[in-house]
Image (cartoon, grey):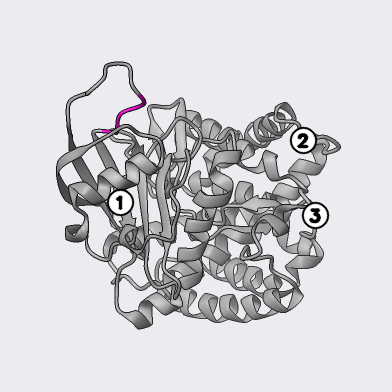
Amino acid sequence: MTGPAGDGGAGPATRTDNPGWIADDPAEITPEWMTDVLRASGNDAEVIGLRFAPVGTGQTAVSYRFHLDLAPDVAPGAAERGPATVVVKMAAGAPAVRRRLRLAYSNEVGFYRTFAGRTPGRVPRCWNAALSEDGLRFTLVLEDAYPARPGNQVDGATPAQALVAVRNLAGLHAPFWNDAALAGDAPWLVRLDDAGLAYLGKVVTAAAAEFTKRYEDELGAEDVDTLRRAAGLVAGWGRHTAAPVSLVHGDYRLDNLLFSGDREVRAVDWQTIEAGFPGRDLAYFVSTALPPADRRAQEAALVAAYHQELVEHGVTDYPADVCFEDYRRGMLQGPLITMIGCVYASAPRTESSDRMFLSMATNAAAAIRDLGVLDLLA
């Protein structure tokens, strides 16, 4: 999606017991609906007209940019007026598809309700985060970041983009670092145990077999071997990633990051969050966002910048050398998310998606070999 932006916090989410604030079709959203949503979050706004158009190419939900016509100020200097545009994100697809995605829907709504306002990392402001009781419908009203643009997974990150992205990631991790209240604040939040990882290991092993067969003409034998062996290590990954624990994005990649130039970035698409090992996010981003030669040249500085940002946000008793080892331990996230995302994608396969998945997989496989990850986690 062409995503929303904010001032670094999510803003107050609206109450969610009003079924009128869950929409299944953008045509259901009226000026009165939008006025109620904005006013419930502290904007002294009256929307007197609106129009919308689809944005982005989301595979698990759909997003629309709404242009809002606001009534003139009644009292200059009154409370904050509403925005000129917002992005509305909602569920899509048949009930069977939605049932498979209920966890993703509840994760994203839960993030904006519970966590977004507690992080110094840059995330969208949210006016409405509503989820139906059956979990099959949701509606987010998010601040629009246009003209910020998502990164390009195939082209890779520039050095400046990579640096701002890892610093932003540390800002997202730091507030929840080894926070004992994390699960209590959000009982719905996933934390993979050994049984969960064993099941995930079976899923990714099957995905690796299909992925490497599908792209056998484009993948070299070395990459095929690395990807299959990495998948085989997922079931026992928990022995190496039990601590530290933080709020993990799970899919922190270039396509889910909105860049305003090279100095500002915001993370969107929070459907894969969990309480987990933060090195997974760091390894996933660096290993997939940079071609091997660029990663080799930059990774030490990028991990050091991430670590320094953690320290500046109050994370203690976490030495820089341990941080780098955790970066190595997190490396299975790249092939895990890439191959499962590719093989089980609900969207039709395209030449563009093939290029993206191949770029991510080959970049991640090279990082796994360079860093001796297979031996480390064996």
Rendered position, 210 above or below 130? below
Q: Residue at x 71, y 59 (%)?
A: 183
Front label number (3 vs 1) = 1
Instruction: Give the extent of the magenta segment.
Output: 79-83
In which quadrant of the rendered view does residue 43 lie? top left
Position of residue 55 measured from the top left corner of the image (x, y, whole percent): 24, 50
Q: Earlier in the sequence, mark 1 or mark 2?
A: 1
Task: State the residue at coordinates (71%, 51%).
Answer: 328
Residue 127 higher or lower than 312, as above or below: below
Which residue bears the numbered disc 3?
Answer: 243
**From this viewpoint, is residue 252 visible?**
no
Q: Nearer the viewer, mark 1 or mark 2?
A: 1
In the rendered view, would you say 299 is above or below 268?
above
Q: Is residue 164 visible?
A: yes
In the rendered structure, does residue 81 fall within the stretch colored magenta?
yes
Q: Which residue is mark 2?
A: 315
- Residue at the disc numbered 1: 88
Spatial CA distance of label 1 from label 2 is: 35 Å
